[in-house]
Image (spheres, grey):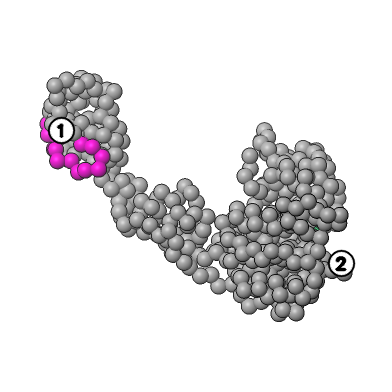
Amino acid sequence: MISYDEALTVAFRTATSVPRRAVSVPLLEARGRVLAREIVSDIDMPPFNRAAMDGYAVRAEDIVSAPAELDVTGTVSAGTMPTVNVGPGQAARIMTGAPVPSGADSVVGVEDTECRNERVTVKVSLPVGKNIAPQGEDVRKGDVVAVADTLIRTAMLGLLGAAGAASVDVYRHPEVAVLTTGTELVDISQRPAPGQIRNTNILTLRALLADTGIKCRELGGVPDDIEKLRKAVRKGLGSDVLMVSGGVSRGDYDFVPRVFEEEGVTKIFHKVAMRPGKPLFLGRKGDKLVFGIPGNPVSTFVSFEMLVKPVLLTLSGDSRHRPSFIKATFTGGRARGSSREQMLPGILSAGDGLPHAKTTEWHGSGDMRGLSQANCFIRVPGGTNPPADGDIVEAHPFGAFR
Ligand code: AMP
Ligand code: MG
């Protein structure tokens, strides 16, 4: 059985060997995706010497010995180029965002002026360049504003749009087919009969996929019937990635690894020394990747977050993605030792210095309530004593850390 770190390394190696393809998408849809080609600005930013305040465009030399009285020769508003020129003893009324007229080299805020009959008294003296954002200060025409392989974040969208990139080349997202297995499963809208279980994994996996921005092809659920499973797996192998929930352990009805093999899937690993999530399977058929994800709901979540998601993000072009671990002070909760590395549902909160991490009350891989309060997994190495209060631990934050 391989360790979590080994599984991650092998999974990344596999994912990076699948060829990436670029697609052109409208800029807004590029958020959260990875640039396949650099973006070059087709303009200067600012595109002209821009007034940063509402006030008067003046010549700094005219107001050296303020107060000074100047003739107002016109008004410049945003959206048009000025027709006025500011000569000695003159000023132009100007609005924020408007181009500074020629002759002027400083903008005085309206609150430092008094205007009567097109004569303005400027009450302060200002240095050259005050309240003017010079043309090209931020970006020059022809500058690369984002290199290839950049992950496009919300904070970057405005810049790319301003650079003229109305659509951009990003790496294609994989299509991910999701299949759940288990004769006991019923839809969440139903009340389970004795022996039945509501199918929550389909919900969780769809939501986790949505959080990554990757589309889900839902294949529904199949009972633990080898032929029905085979048919569904064949269908799922039409997508770039197939995720099958359940049936991947060693029970009499756990047919998934066998069906994968019979359908030409080569095993990359099966079983990871991780708790929860041990039965996780990764396989490959050509350029298609196949996951067998343990059916226990917390195992499903941990498996996706710690191993499946990194692979999907890599397939989406983000070759630098790694699950992040931050150091935290353990502040208690229920933790016991295990020979396997543990990912314990925990709560991470701000502390003095290091953040604090405590485990939720959690009863094992089936306990969704223990997971529901968590915003991190506390990583406890295998074969060590459980952490004690005050120990430094590693925690992986997930979802929104708040
Ligand atoms: P399995 O991985 O198929 O051996 O299932 C392990 C446990 O997880 C069993 O208790 C199943 O009932 C439960 N389980 C399997 N699939 C799901 C699912 N889609 N939603 C909720 N629980 C599930
Ligand atoms: Mg099952």
Q: Residue type at mark 2: give it.
A: Gly
Q: Distance between the Cα atoms at labels 1 and 2?
A: 85 Å
Under mark 1, the amino acid is Gly
> Which residue is drawn at the image coordinates 73% and 56% (left, top)?
187
Query: In the rendering, at what x and y percent does residue 248 appear?
Result: 79, 66
Q: Residue at x 50, y 51 (%)?
A: 153
Q: Which mark is residue 74?
A: 1
Quadrant observed for ligand 1 in the rendered image: bottom right
Helix, strand or loop at mark 2? loop
Q: Which mark is residue 57?
A: none
- Counting residues from the start of the chain, the first of labels 1 and 2 encountered is 1
Residue under numbered circle 2: 251
Task: Tell me the magenta residue range.
Answer: 76-88
Residue 19 in the figure: left or right of residue 163 = right
Give the position of the N terminus as an image quadrant: bottom right
Near mark 2 (Cα within 10 A), the count class, few <14, some 14-19 or many ≥20, is few
Residue 61 relative to residue 345: left or right:
left
In which quadrant of the rendered image does the C terminus lie? top right
Toward the viewer: 14 or 29? 29
Instruction: Tell me residue 15's x, y (percent).
Output: 62, 68
